[in-house]
Every structure is written in structure tokens, then in C-alpha cells.
Image (spheres, coloured by chain):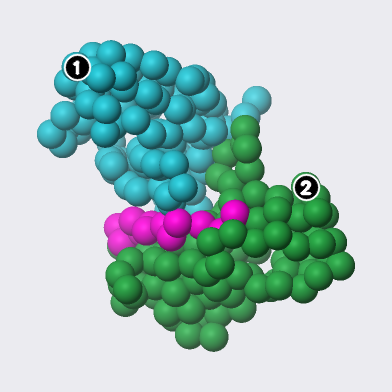
Amino acid sequence: ETGVTQTPRHLVMGMTNKKSLKCEQHLGHNAMYWYKQSAKKPLELMFVYSLEERVENNSVPSRFSPECPNSSHLFLHLHTLQPEDSALYLCASSQGLGLKGDNEQFFGPGTRLTVL
Amino acid sequence: QKEVEQDPGPLSVPEGAIVSLNCTYSNSAFQYFMWYRQYSRKGPELLMYTYSSGNKEDGRFTAQVDKSSKYISLFIRDSQPSDSATYLCAMSARGSNYKLTFGKGTLLTVNP
């Protein structure tokens, strides 16, 4: 595997389900990100982790719970979602947070989530 | 006013045309400017990155930044069908480089 991988690629869940999205980066990066991409709306930054520490929570509802067990893996735990949470969820990684010009973000292919 | 405005298109051009894609922004703190390309069913990939006003060229692609007008552009010369994708502008401020603010993206189709 190379780059940034995400599983599953597609997920359909009911509003009472609990599911998790997984992201893995094979680039040796130290920072990882979750983004939400909805139709007709710009990409929205959700969470940022640097060296497994959360550095950004962009006012995301608590029904989204991120977890970063190590610098290569990032999870997004989902519970009691709403239909408006249906979107493409993208994971990205970068060498650092950009303070030294090292913030090129590499994206995974995304998980297409549908909440019924 | 949205922080970043980008015409979503769609934009359809014949092969070989010059394509101009644009974004305007309102936050004068933005110092870093990027263009991403996103193919269908893929994640965005970085095309161009610049942090100063002026032009930056890479092959058939030229990124232009005018900070005084808060306006950025991406030009594609000799467009190819393989350039058909959604183009996203993104920008960030000094000190929070990692916090990218994106435009909605412009869907481009280059017809053979």
C-alpha cells in the first residue's frame, strides 16, 4: 500500500448504528486530518492530529469521535448520526503542521457515508 | 461574505483550449495559496502551491496570485481530456498553515 488509504470506501448506516472509519498513511508523516466534503459545499476541516495529539477540533458535534493511536493511523468513530451527516469523509496527512513549509497535505480516496 | 468564493461551474471546453479558473477571498491574513485537482471518486491532489504575489509556472499550469485584489487564478494551457476534474482552490494564514480554507471547487470537462 502506498500513500493514504481509507476503509471502508462506502458505508451505509442507520441513525442508531455505531461505525468507524479507518485511515492509514504510509508516508511517514506526523500530522493527520479528517475533512468532510458535502455536495455543493467546500471541504470542511474537522480534526487535526500532530504526533498523536489533537490540535484542532473545528466545532464538530460529539457524535463524531476521532482517535489517533499512532502517527500512521486515524479513526473516526460515528454514533447516532443524522441524515445531514451523509458526505464524503476524507483523511489527509502531512509531514508536519506547516510551520516549516512542510504542510503539503496528501489525501486518501475518502469514505462515502450515507446515513438513512 | 464567504471567506473563499469559487464559481462551481460546470465549465466545458474543447481540447487544446486555455482554461482560466479563479477564486476570490476576503481574509487578508491568507498568505499561502494552493490549487488541488480532484478526479471523480478520488481524493484531492496538490497541483500548485505559492505564497507570494505573482506567477508560478509548472508545465502547462500557471498559478497567479494578486494579494492586493485578493484574487487567485489557475491557467491550464493546451488542455487535455485528462485534465477533466474538479479544481479546488485552498488557502491558509501564517501561523496556522495547516488550516486550509477551500473554495467549493470548479468542475472542468475538456472535450476531445
Is the same chain shared between marks 1 and 2?
no
What colour has chain A?
A: green
Instruction: Tell whether position A107 is magenta.
Output: yes
Left or right: A91 in relation to A1: right
Please, what is the three-letter code of the amino acid marked with disc 1? Gly
What letter labels the chain drawn in cyan? Answer: B
- The chain letter under disc 2 is A
The quarter of the picture where the C terminus of chain A appears is: bottom right
Taking the spot 81% from the left edge, 70% from the top edge, the residue there is: A17
- The image shows residue B54, relative to residue A39, as above or below, that is above
Q: Is residue A44 in sight in this rendering?
A: no
Query: Which residue is rendered at x = 70% and y = 60% of the image?
Result: A12
Q: How many marks?
A: 2
- Give the residue drawn at x 44%, y 74%: A24
Q: Residue furthest bottom?
A: A69
The N terminus of chain A lies in quadrant = bottom left
The region drawn magenta spans A101-112
Q: Residue at x 55, y 79 (%)?
A: A68
Mark 2 lies on a secondary structure that is helix
- In the picture of the structure, the residue carrying the numbered disc 2 is A84
Give the residue type that dot 2 points to: Glu
Q: A64 above or below B95?
A: below
Indicate which disc residue B16 carries. 1
Residue A102 visible in the picture:
yes
Where does residue B49 sit, x and y in percent of width and height?
29, 43
User: Viewer-proximal residue, B66 or B15?
Assistant: B15
Q: Could you give the CA–CA distance between mark 1 and mark 2, rounded to whole angstroms?
A: 40 Å
Secondary structure, mark 1, is: loop
- Residue B80's quadrant in the figure? top left
Query: For the view shown, which residue lies furthest in the right direction?
Result: A16
Q: Position of residue B57 (x, y in %)?
A: 16, 32
